[in-house]
Structures are given as structure tokens and as C-alpha cells.
């Protein structure tokens, strides 16, 4: 559902202004195959990031050599293999930008991703978190259908602005039925990231680990939506989400964790649990077909 509203901020967008500074954080482990292309799309943004921080999470292949090809354009941080959530938090701790934008090491940004997110944030200054739409990509072929097109009817009430949408009504109770947030599309104010506690290291090495972070961000309105595919989510055999049955099991484990432990979930426990029941049923159906 869309509600039109008047622009709430003048259109004097000034990309170099400190309020528009973005620190990009990429966690990588043994991905010399894709990291070069990912970094190329990040450094090719129409509004360049203030800094790009690559956290090498104990890679044993030639990932470091590939990252070093980019010279001073990229800040390389080497850590022990502490897994992706800790690696992202380590990168965020070194960031200096007003905003943090995360990207998985194998995903691709379209050139105007950061600019369009920043323009919406400038237009509506009280938003703390901005997502874009995305489409999956397999062997270089991008899917015709985008992620947001799969949102259930009346999932959110969207206020239409010049540069995108803003959600001001809570969707917390609906988040186990559809998850709009994904790591490579998110842009979050650095202070807000700190206030929600960053990525949850208790769900380390789980292919659905980022749900925990996005759940906490999406539980605080208002937030922004750029309804345009500005990221290509690469599907390939080596990715953590390649096995659909494991992905569903991991998703169920993550939702059990959030419903049990997160204060934001407690007022919506019944609704979220209903969504969890549906996920379990979907897993049973997948297992019967496999």
C-alpha cells in the first residue's frame, strides 16, 4: 500500500557533505574468485564511498593479493577466522563515515546504489536505515523478478517521496513472513548500528545470520526503501545459501533465537511464531521432494 506525501526536505543534495559520507564494509573469506568484481562495482559508484574496508577473515587462498591490487582505494584489515558477523563488526568499528553500507564479497552493486540511498536519506532526514530492491543472478544471468515483488499484500504502508518510500508503521510482527533486508542492500547510520549492537555473533556460521541484524533495524521506524533493483545477489555453488534445505534450517534456527532472546520480538511473539510454523512446514515439504 502506498501513501503519497509531500517532500519533507529541499533537494539541495550535496554529495561531498560529511553527512553523506559512507563507509563500505566487506567481510571476505577465501573468495579470490569474486571479490575483484565486487570491489570494482563499489569503487565505481556515482557517489564514491568515503572509505572501503575489507576485512579478510583468515583467508588461506590468494584473496589478500587480489584485494591489494586496489591499492589505497581499499583499507585491508586482516583478522583470524572469527566468521562473518565478527568480521563485519570489526570493519564497522574502524569506520569513520556517517553511514555504513555492507556488501557480501560476491555480490554486485549497480552504479547509482549509494547515490539513490543517500538522496532519500537527505530528503527524509529522520530515517536511520535504507534498503534497496535486488535481483538474484546465476551464471551472469539476472532474474526477471525482484525481491520486493514477492512481498505479501499489505506487508507495509509506504509513504511515497521523491527519491523513494518511507515506512513509518511497525512491520515487526510480519518479518517472519517476508524479510526485506539483506546485507548487500543495507545502508545504516553508524550511530544507529552501534545502538542496536551490530551483527549478532551468537549466530555465527549460519547462512541466515544477517536476519538478526535486519530484524533489529526494521523494528525501529521510520526507515527508507529505494524500490529499484540496485544490487545483484549472486547465487553460486560455493555460497552459504546454495543449499535450500540448509538455508531453511538455518532460517528456522535464527528465528527461534530471535523470538526467544530479542526484546523487540516479545510484543509480536504470537505473529512471529505463526510465521515460524509456516517455515517449518515449508522445510518439511522441501525434504519430502528431495
Image (spheres, rainbow, N blue to C red):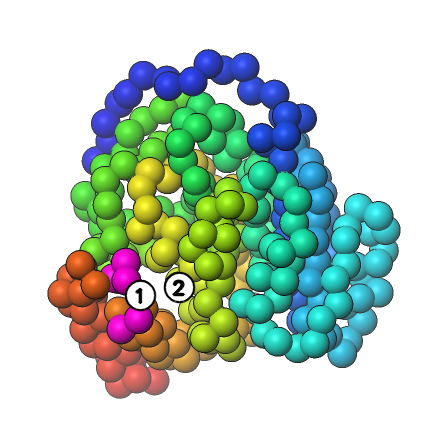
Labels 2 and 1: the sequence-earlier one? 2
Quick check: 174 left or right of 255?
left
User: Residue at horizontal 62%, vertical 56%?
Assistant: 93
Instruction: Compute the Cα span from label 2 to label 1.
Output: 9 Å
Instruction: Please determine whether, in this image, residue 259 is positioned above or below residue 48.
Output: below
Q: Residues within 10 Å of mark 2 (few under 14, many from 20)?
A: many
Instruction: Please determine whether, in this image, residue 273 is positioned above or below residue 38.
Output: below
User: Residue at horizontal 19%, vertical 43%?
Assistant: 154
The answer to which image quadrant residue 79 occupies is bottom right
Quadrant housing the N terminus: top left
User: Residue at horizontal 57%, vertical 52%?
Assistant: 102
Quick check: 1 left or right of 246?
left
Q: Which residues are magenta?
A: 260-265
Is residue 15 found inside the magenta-colored segment of the image?
A: no
Residue 160, percent from left and from top: 32, 27
Q: Which residue corresponds to mark 2?
A: 212
Quick check: 20 left or right of 215?
right
Q: Are marks 2 and 1 in contact (CB under 8 Å)?
A: yes
Q: Which residue corresponds to mark 1?
A: 262
Q: Nearer the viewer, mark 2 or mark 1?
A: 1
Residue 70, percent from left and from top: 82, 51
The answer to which image quadrant residue 62 occupies is bottom right
Amino acid at each position: 500500500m502506498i501513501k503519497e506525501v509531500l517532500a519533507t526536505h529541499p533537494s539541495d543534495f550535496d554529495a561531498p557533505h560529511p553527512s553523506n559520507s559512507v563507509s563500505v564494509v566487506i567481510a571476505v573469506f577465501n573468495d579470490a574468485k569474486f571479490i575483484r568484481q565486487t570491489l570494482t562495482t563499489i569503487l565505481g559508484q556515482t557517489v564514491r564511498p568515503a572509505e572501503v574496508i575489507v576485512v579478510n577473515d583468515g583467508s588461506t587462498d590468494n584473496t589478500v593479493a587480489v584485494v591489494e591490487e586496489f591499492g589505497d582505494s581499499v583499507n585491508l584489515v586482516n583478522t583470524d577466522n572469527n566468521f562473518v558477523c565478527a568480521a563485519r563488526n570489526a570493519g564497522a568499528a574502524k569506520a569513520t563515515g556517517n553511514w555504513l553500507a555492507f556488501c557480501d564479497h560476491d555480490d554486485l552493486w549497480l552504479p547509482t546504489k549509494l547515490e539513490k540511498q543517500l538522496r532519500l536519506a537527505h530528503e527524509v532526514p529522520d530515517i536511520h536505515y535504507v534498503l534497496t530492491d535486488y535481483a538474484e543472478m546465476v551464471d551472469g544471468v539476472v532474474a526477471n523478478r525482484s525481491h520486493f515483488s514477492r512481498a505479501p499484500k499489505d506487508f507495509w504502508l509506504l509513504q511515497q517521496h521523491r527519491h523513494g518510500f518511507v515506512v513509518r508503521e511497525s512491520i515487526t510482527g510480519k518479518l517472519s513472513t517476508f524479510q526485506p533486508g539483506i546485507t548487500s542492500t543495507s545502508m545504516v547510520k553508524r550511530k544507529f548500528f552501534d545502538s542496536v549492537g551490530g551483527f549478532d555473533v551468537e549466530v555465527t556460521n549460519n547462512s541466515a545470520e544477517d536476519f538478526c541484524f535486519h530484524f533489529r533495524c526494521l523494528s525501529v521506524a521510520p526507515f527508507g526503501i529505494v524500490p529499484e533493483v540496485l544490487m545483484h545477489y549472486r547465487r553460486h555453488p560455493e555460497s552459504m545459501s546454495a543449499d535450500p534445505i540448509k538455508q531453511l534450517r538455518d532460517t528456522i534456527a535464527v528465528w527461534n533465537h530471535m523470538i526467544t532472546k530479542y526484546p523487540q520480538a516479545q510484543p509480536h511473539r504470537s505473529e512471529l511464531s505463526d510465521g515460524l510454523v509456516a517455515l517449518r512446514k515449508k522445510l518439511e515439504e522441501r525434504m519430502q521432494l528431495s
